[in-house]
Image (cartoon, rainbow, N blue to C red):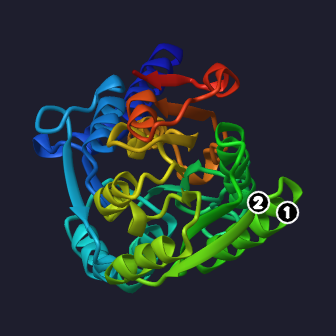
Amino acid sequence: MLARALCLLVMVEIELVGAPLANAEQAGRLPRIGVLWSSPIDQWSTAFRDGLRENGYVDGATAVIDIRATGRKLESGPALAEELIASEPDVIYAVPGVLAREVVNAEKRAGKEIPIVVTTQDLVAEGLVASVTHPGGNITGIAGVAAPGELMTKHLQLLKEMIPRLKRVGCLTDTSWKEFSVLTKSALEKAGPQIGVRVSSIDVRSPDDIEHALSEIAKQRVDAMIVPLTPMFLATRDRIISFASKHHLPTAYAEELFTYDGGLMSYGFSVSDRYRRAAAVVAKILHGAKPGDIPVDYNVRFRLVVNLRVAKALQLQVPESVLLQADEVIR
């Protein structure tokens, strides 16, 4: 009797352990990863795929990656979210928070609860999760800077250090991100007088408004410019970088991609690094972890990238004090 009981117990354990694997690979079906983001930036897309590959998921071989991008048309988010959900993915990766919210709403309408991994500014502040350590529900992810205004202040300080004569700075402000723009304006208006700089915030309401905003920058004859990282400015970065070059305007950006594409310098977190880390979270969920049990990752590493080729074109001598702070110098 004892031997028979032990045999039955072992068989039950084998069935319990094997069940998830059988469900995950039923009928030869590969795990399906849905992706919804604003701009298909090659560096970021590659970082996400590399992160998945490091965890055993290769598109077409060990997984299916279904990517939808809104581009400049963020209003297409709801429709694209519904399309992804209809394809029945095992997990959805959404960037930024505004698109993650569209996925959440689309899931509610469809009566489904597919795990969601988000990369955004602050998942708690944006109401996507209940807490950092115990998100709960079906959402977790990678967070950015809890106080974006402080990041913009660092840009102002770096510009002043690089250009001692600095008196006037123009900052493009994406008003479609209301809370972000308010924090940015407030921080810069407070920091400016402390270092003897006047800061003008130029509102940009949509990508179609970028030309008008840049014209206003030119009219104000500012000594330098600050460009935060938002989907709108990312989508129009070629125009912004070209404007800064044409007007010989030293500009500080919030993401290294701008510096690689011809900007003077950038200070902020690496988006590529965040995408790679998000891929690892996606892999955890595919391996059976519940998103509500995975703490939100607030581990932010800031990088300063300086482009000396651009500095030379601007006839700007970058001080040694700035170069010593740089994580990367493009020569």
Mark 2: amino acid: Val
Local SS, label 2 = loop
Spot occupied by residue 120 in the image (x, y as percentages of width and height): 54, 58
- Residue at figure coordinates x 50%, y 23% from the top left: 328
Q: Which residue is tagged 1? A: 193
Circle 2 packing at 10 Å, graded few (<14), some (14-19), many (20+), is many
Mark 1: amino acid: Pro
Q: Which residue is tagged 2? A: 197
Marks 1,2: beta carbons within 8 A: yes
Count of numbered marks:
2
Viewer-proximal residue among 315 and 60: 315
Using the rendered image of the protein, determine whether residue 38 is visible from the camera's viewpoint.
no
Spot occupied by residue 182 in the image (x, y as percentages of width and height): 69, 76
- Residue at figure coordinates x 22%, y 73% from the top left: 83
Q: Residue furthest top?
A: 3
Spot occupied by residue 257 in the image (x, y as percentages of width and height): 39, 43
